[in-house]
Amino acid sequence: MKKTLFIIAIIIFGSHFGVAIAAEAPKVDYKNSPILDNDLDGLTDEGEKQIYKTDSNNPDTDGDGILDGAEVLNGTNPLDSTSPSAVQNITVREYSEGSPEKWSWYLTRAGGLISFLLLYLAIFFGIAIRFPGLKKIFQPVDSYDFHAWISVQALIFVIIHGLVLLTDEYLNFSLKDLFIPLSSTYQPELVTLGVLGMYAMVAVILTSYFRKYISQRIWRVTHFLNIVLYGLAFFHAYYLGTDLKVGIAREIFLGMNILLLGLMLVSLILKLRSVFVSKKDEIA
């Protein structure tokens, strides 16, 4: 099972990162004329005419309050005012002819998505093993070692996700931004969710591997951080993840998490019911 999950993670990582190999920036034919940006929206005049079909004399073609260049960078439609607005207003620089997109941007996105997927699976299997109807299906692949292993893999991809950001020339992240909450000047609250989630993940992993050296009570309390960790990771990914802004990826992400939340609630209800029945029998 470990090998299967590892192969799946590598396939997802490779396919996402492989987009960087095939993707090239749109090529603009400037015909030896000056490269101009008359409306100062971050897109060159010829780029707007030849590729994006936006108005080179209007910095906000669709009138939604977001610069055309910012919308292009964030994957929204600069020609449609109903398209989800860009969530950050950052300086846009159009890539010159033949210049590839930054590999680090693909790498950090892939690392973040895979780390969340592995965290999701760890929590899902933990619930499924005690859930009526699912127990028989997932019990053969569930074990204490499996949970510890999959959590470590998630942490590895979290580290990749964070460290690669240090090479991004637009966001200008530093080690302080990655490890100290509210240090980042870029979306500080949302970045902090990721930082706190990483620390929660480290705490859960360490107490799992050193379980025999600590009390059962401490281990259980610390293990409940999984719920906190999941919440932090969800909101960090949902509101900051570039790939989850629009489209089928967003729908799949929401569907998966609604399913997991439903399983959590039902599992909690069954647990409370079991405790109530047990106490009732003791009184009787």
Image (spheres, rainbow, N blue to C red):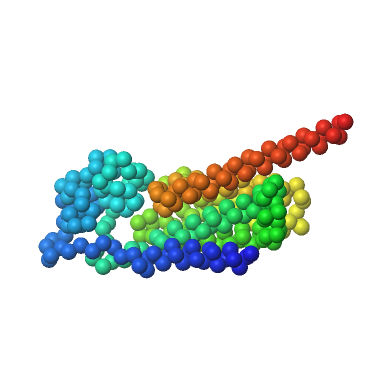
Q: Is residue 47 left or right of residue 270?
A: left
Q: Residue at x 67, y 55 (%)?
A: 137
Q: Residue at x 77, y 37 (%)?
A: 275
Q: Is residue 234 left or right of residue 247?
A: right
- Where is residue 2? Give x, y as percent: 63, 65
Residue 120 appears in the figure: yes
Count the marks: 0
Instruction: Give the position of the C terminus as an image quadrant.
Output: top right
Name of the residue lying farthest toward the top: 284
Residue toward you, 183 or 249? 249
- Where is residue 165? Give x, y as percent: 43, 59
Residue toward you, 100 or 62? 62
Q: Quadrant of residue 100?
A: bottom left
Name of the residue lying farthest toward the right: 284
- Where is residue 192? Give x, y as percent: 49, 48
Residue 192 appears in the figure: no
Q: Residue at x 51, y 46 (%)?
A: 255
Q: Is residue 56 left or right of residue 222?
A: left
Q: Is residue 183 left or right of residue 270?
A: left
Instruction: Give the position of the N terminus as an image quadrant.
Output: bottom right
Residue toward you, 74 or 225? 74
- Where is residue 269? Give x, y as percent: 68, 37
